[in-house]
Amino acid sequence: YGANSSEEDDVEDFFLSVVQDTVDKLQEHGCITVNKSEGTDYYVGGAALGRAASNFYLQYQTPKQMQSGTRSLKNILAQHAAETKKSQDAPKDSFLLGNAKTSFRIQRVQTLTAKNVVSTYGIAKILYSLSHTHEFNELPVRHNEEELNLELSRSLPWGYDLSKVSWWMDKQKGAGKNILDIMLDPHTKCFLLLQAFMFRAKLPISDYINDMRTVVEQIPRLLAAMEFVAEDDKTSAGNFELFSAFPLVRRVFNSGVMPDAPSPTKGPSIKLSNIKVVRELKKGSHFHSWCLAIDFNVSMNGWKRPFSKKANRNTSGGQSVSIILGTLKGGYLLCKSSFSIPDSVKEKSWKKHMKLEFEWSIAETQSGPYADGQAVILRVVNEFVNGCDFEVEISLKE
């Protein structure tokens, strides 16, 4: 079985080598930490990537691949998000109730749209990164399927890579890997199948139907794992836009609603009220901690979520709303949360009270001192319908 002999010493050496090899691999991929300072004994501790692998049943290499993908996306979003218009001013009456409409803290209210190159790239990049993890190494690419994959890629809006949605890059390509070799890659096929599911593309043969089902069923779990991994980097620039993109991907897979889908003529509405900001000086520090308390008032206006064949039936229950708090300058994430609207809410109104706690030191380092009257951006993103997303700029100045 790998030992030099059945002698006790040889068996013990073999087991030690297996343990050492395993520890080295887990450490290399960021799943554990190893402290070798205590003589010949090692102290092995868990790391965030290892917890992700354990919590979400991942291959040990996958969390580091997810981390690489989210960091790459954050860099792009931090550089280019401000260049693209994703919002427009909206009347306060549309999204505020009661004293919130006259509160000095509300600087502006804007509607959000996912119909832009930044949001499209964010969705595509997240799915591309998930497709290229070890989770899909065993996706079958059968004889002659490289030709079918090539044909399928030509019918899909994003193609086989991200070049079509990377709007800031020169689309001209030099000599590189043979295109049929790329089409033999199971990760390429995975990315194509995800697009086929999203855009309702015609699949070349019946085998692809089961392949697509196998791929799509894993996306909610892998997306949750990627978000878990990204939280470990939440103090870096670009995270605000990154965590604003995750709900858009869930909207596609949980509800079958594409970013360019038309908004309902009479859809659900969410209005904010009783907005309160409280700050406290942290013990032993000159930084402040903050609590933003808000009431979310939901009215479904008789709207019912239509059944969609595209929706993932395993995850289509519930009507979730993501709340993302951050800074526009630098795109720092301050806090994220969510709530689900009960299915029983149809005609009547429903209220959800939430408290969002965050540290201003993250934004203060990037955007200046509190005395200058800094503001935070609160984004409300529906995961079940288009056209109802908005953001509110809330002043922290007293």
Image (cartoon, rainbow, N blue to C red):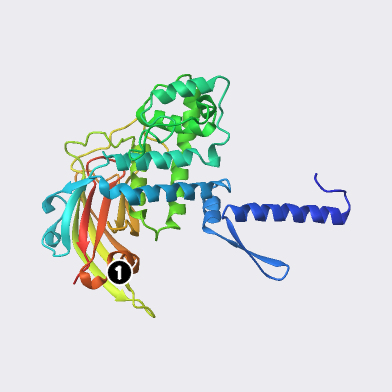
**Residue 141 image offset from top left, x and y in percent:** 55, 26
Q: Residue at x 57, y 55 (%)?
A: 31
**Residue 205 image offset from top left, x and y in percent:** 48, 19
- Which structural element holds mark 1? strand
Q: Relative to residue 60, is residue 197 drawn left or right?
A: left
Q: Relative to residue 76, is residue 97 drawn left or right?
A: left
Q: Residue at x 40, y 41 (%)?
A: 125
Camera sees residue 11 = yes
Camera sees residue 316 = no
Q: How many marks?
A: 1
User: Of residues 167 and 67, which is closer to you in this image?
Assistant: 167
Picture quarter with the C terminus: bottom left
Q: Amino acid at mark 1?
A: Trp
* Vertical relation: 222 (above or below) 283: above
* Vertical relation: 220 (above or below) 139: below
Picture quarter with the N terminus: top right
**Residue 223 image offset from top left, x and y in percent:** 44, 45
Q: Relative to residue 206, is residue 303 drawn left or right?
A: left
**Residue 39 image offset from top left, x and y in percent:** 72, 71
| Residue hosting label 1 | 290
How packed is label 1: few (under 14 Cα within 10 Å), some, or many (20 or more)? some
User: Of residues 361 and 1, which is closer to you in this image?
Assistant: 361
Q: Residue at x 17, y 38 (%)?
A: 266
Given the current orientation, which residue lies at the most extreme bottom position? 284
Q: Residue at x 33, y 54 (%)?
A: 240
